[in-house]
Amino acid sequence: MGSVFGNTEYVIDVPDIPKNHLTNDIDNLKFQLSSVIKRYNYGNSVSLEENERGITIHIVNDILFRSGVAELSSESQNILHQLALILKELPNDIRIEGHTDNIQINSVAYPSNWHLSVARALNTAYYLIQVEGLSQEKLSIVGNSEYKPLADNETIEGRSKNRRVDIVIIK
């Protein structure tokens, strides 16, 4: 940069990070997360996806929340605790995303699916911060309502896959 701005005195040569080093870190993280899912038999409720954003942990609604509410169940605390043991060691930013199916909710507490999806993401993030000790600086929340489905909302099975919280480990 110094040569671009006319000052070659401060040019620093930064070594390249080997590509296999980054790949090994991602592969190791996926292995650790997969091991937790397998060890605690969460395969029906938790899945992993790697994409351009990073690694996404999809947690189906039924393990985290009762229908139509945003308070974490006792079972959810077990899975979040196991995942937090890995997540809190990461330098990456983490985004908690709430999702719903397309069946509209209209309650006093949650007048829309947006409200419910945000509340679920928020409660998940608060648990990870307050109980598990994840850094507030690393976490953010998003409420997606029904607008980013994983499956077809026309079936019961599809809707159950769409009611979820995603934990996105940002690359």
Image: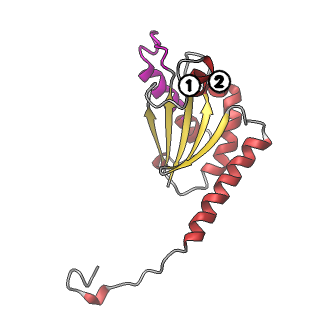
Q: Identify which residue is drawn at 27% across, 82% down.
A: 2
Query: Residue 18: image x %, image y %?
Result: 55, 74
Question: Amino acid under label 1?
Answer: Arg
Q: Is residue 106 left or right of residue 4?
A: right
Farthest-out residue, left: 6
Q: Secondary structure at mark 2?
A: helix
Q: Is residue 70 left or right of residue 104?
A: right
Q: Identify which residue is drawn at 42% across, 23% down.
A: 114
Query: Residue 124: image x %, image y %?
Result: 56, 33
Q: How is the image coloured?
A: secondary structure
Front-most of residues 121 and 126: 121
Q: Is residue 155 left or right of residue 116?
A: right
Where on the picture, by quarter, is residue 1? bottom left
The reply to whether the C-beta atoms of the residues labelled 2 and 1 are less than 8 Å apart is yes
Residue behind mark 1: 163
How many marks are shown on the rendered structure?
Answer: 2
Residue 71 visible somewhere in the drawing: no
Q: Residues within 10 Å of mark 1 (few under 14, many from 20)?
A: many
Check if residue 76 falls in the magenta segment.
Answer: no
Query: Residue 65: image x %, image y %?
Result: 61, 23
Residue behind mark 2: 62
Query: Residue 154: image x %, image y %?
Result: 54, 18
Mark 2 vs 1, N-terminal side? 2
Q: Identify which residue is drawn at 68% across, 40% down.
A: 81
Residue 130 visible somewhere in the drawing: yes
Label 2 – label 1 distance at C-alpha: 8 Å
State the extent of the magenta-drawn residues as a range.
102-124
Q: Is residue 84 left or right of residue 149?
A: right
